[in-house]
């Protein structure tokens, strides 16, 4: 009897080790100790897919570091198997059904930055969801790299949709101005970047 009990325990342990780790939040010990988002509300999640340069889908949300009870409640009401996230305060050229110049490059940069499969969403105190029920936030790698700032510095995005006083906006403008000064990517074609988006009519 003792022998069969041990065989059953070993079988159960082996079965749990082989089963997929579904709906498990990513471990927090991967976060850089000096990451700039640590003094704010933030979410650690797995990247389901990169939609384009300013939108991703996430799964396996860890909301342990969200202190706002209202926001926690709203997040818990979402379909946590797949949450759509829009990058706050930036706009990139389209790379979905509509294709715009440098849209593919912006998408590829985001994929490269998030290639570990994890992402941090810092929730700005002045924005959490948009009218399409997409989660808004400042996007970071677990190493503390601000994805919006990286896109702007490479000339693959514009600062946009500033409906309030968001965190990091000064950094975003500085990154955008540096890319403009060097004529990088979207800034290499006069008139391509407009206040309303990207004008493909000026592309030869």
Image (cartoon, grey):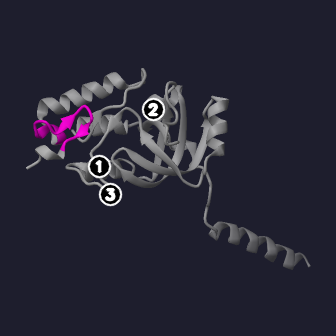
Tag nearer the camera, 3 or 2: 3
Q: Where does residue 73 sit, x and y in percent of width and height?
A: 67, 37
Dot 3, how many residues are within 10 Å of its Cα: few (below 14), some (14-19), or many (20+)? few
When asked about the image quadrant of residue 188, the answer is: top left
> In 3D space, how far apart are the residues under numbered discs 3 and 2 (Cα atoms)?
35 Å
> In 3D space, how far apart are the residues under numbered discs 3 and 1 (Cα atoms)?
8 Å
Observer able to see residue 143: no
Left or right side of 66 for 182: left
* First-in-chain label (1 vs 2): 2
Q: Which residues are magenta?
A: 186-199
Q: Judging from the image, what secondary structure is the residue with disc 1 in?
A: loop
Query: Which label sits on residue 94?
Result: 1
Dot 2, how many residues are within 10 Å of its Cα: few (below 14), some (14-19), or many (20+)? some
Identified at 56% across, 42% down, the residue is: 28
Foreground residue, 129 or 64?
129
Q: Where does residue 93 sit, x and y in percent of width and height?
A: 27, 45
Observer able to see residue 65: yes
């Amino acid at each position: 009897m003792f022998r069969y009990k041990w065989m059953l325990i070993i079988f159960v342990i082996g079965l749990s080790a082989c089963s997929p780790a579904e709906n498990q939040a990513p471990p927090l010990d991967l976060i850089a100790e000096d990451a700039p988002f640590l003094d704010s509300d933030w979410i650690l999640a797995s990247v389901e897919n990169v939609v384009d340069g300013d939108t991703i889908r996430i799964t396996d949300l860890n909301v342990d570091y969200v202190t706002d009870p209202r926001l926690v409640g709203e997040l818990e009401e979402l379909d946590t198997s797949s949450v759509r996230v829009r990058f706050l305060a930036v706009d990139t050229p389209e790379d979905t059904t509509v294709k715009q110049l440098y849209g593919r490059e912006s998408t590829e940069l985001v994929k490269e930055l998030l290639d570990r499969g994890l992402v941090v969403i810092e929730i700005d105190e002045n924005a959490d969801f948009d009218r399409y029920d997409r989660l808004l936030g400042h996007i970071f790698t677990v190493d503390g790299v601000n994805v919006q700032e990286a896109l702007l510095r490479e000339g693959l995005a514009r600062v946009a949709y500033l409906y309030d006083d968001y965190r990091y906006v000064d950094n975003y403008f500085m990154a955008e101005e540096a890319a403009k000064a060097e004529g990088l990517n979207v800034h290499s074609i006069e008139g391509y970047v407009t206040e309303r988006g990207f004008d493909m009519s000026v592309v030869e």
